[in-house]
Amino acid sequence: MPTLGGLGVLDSSDGPDVEWELLGDAKLLVVENFQPSTVVDRGYALDNAEPQIVALIEALRLVEDLAHFTAKTKDVLYVLLHADVKIAYEIVAIDGGINIAPYSKKYILQKRDDMTYIKGFRDMNKYFDTQ
């Protein structure tokens, strides 16, 4: 395997050639305990310091459908809050912590700020300036 200046072995996902494939729509259910957040200094938003969440993910297509998919590690998903607000998460691990059939998988999701799409926030400060 190639190395990067002796720092270590490169992962296959570290290469510059990345291909994206749309898998489909899914439902997401956050299953972790509630974690309180602090309010930012201006008082109009929460500061979610913890970038990871634990969730169940289920494709909307039936298993018999050829378009059905099962999420896997390194998949990226978007939580759609609005047409102009899409928060990106990457699946970093899968936990099989439920020991009752059908053995649902819990996905550990890491926030990907570099891929999050929030249109219009560039101009938000004009609404909250307290001059």
Image: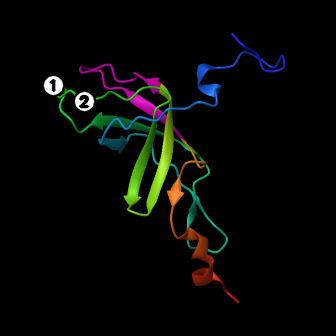
Do the residues bearing badges 1 and 2 touch, measured as CB atoms within 8 Å? yes
* Residue furthest front as drawn: 17
The part of the image, by quadrant, that contains residue 42 is: bottom right
Left or right of 74? Residue 114 is right
Residue occupying the point 64% across, 20% down: 11
Residue occupying the point 46% across, 35% down: 20
The part of the image, by quadrant, that contains residue 83 is: bottom left
How crowded pointer 2 is (Cα within 10 Å; few <14, some 14-19, many 20+) is rated as some
Secondary structure under tag 1 reads loop
Specify the quadrant that holds the N terminus: top right
The alpha-carbon separation of the residues under discs 1 and 2 comes to 7 Å
Kind of residue sitting beneath label 1:
Glu
Closest to the observer, 13 or 126: 13
How crowded pointer 1 is (Cα within 10 Å; few <14, some 14-19, many 20+) is rated as few
Q: Which residue is mark 1?
A: 64
Residue occupying the point 34% across, 43% down: 29
Asked if the magenta segment contains residue 100, the reply would be yes
Magenta residue span: 94-110
Residue 37, compared with residue 68, is above or below; it is: below
Q: Which residue is mark 2?
A: 68
On the image, the x and y values in percent for residue 96 come to: 39, 21
On the image, the x and y values in percent for residue 98 come to: 34, 24
Residue occupying the point 55% across, 67% down: 45
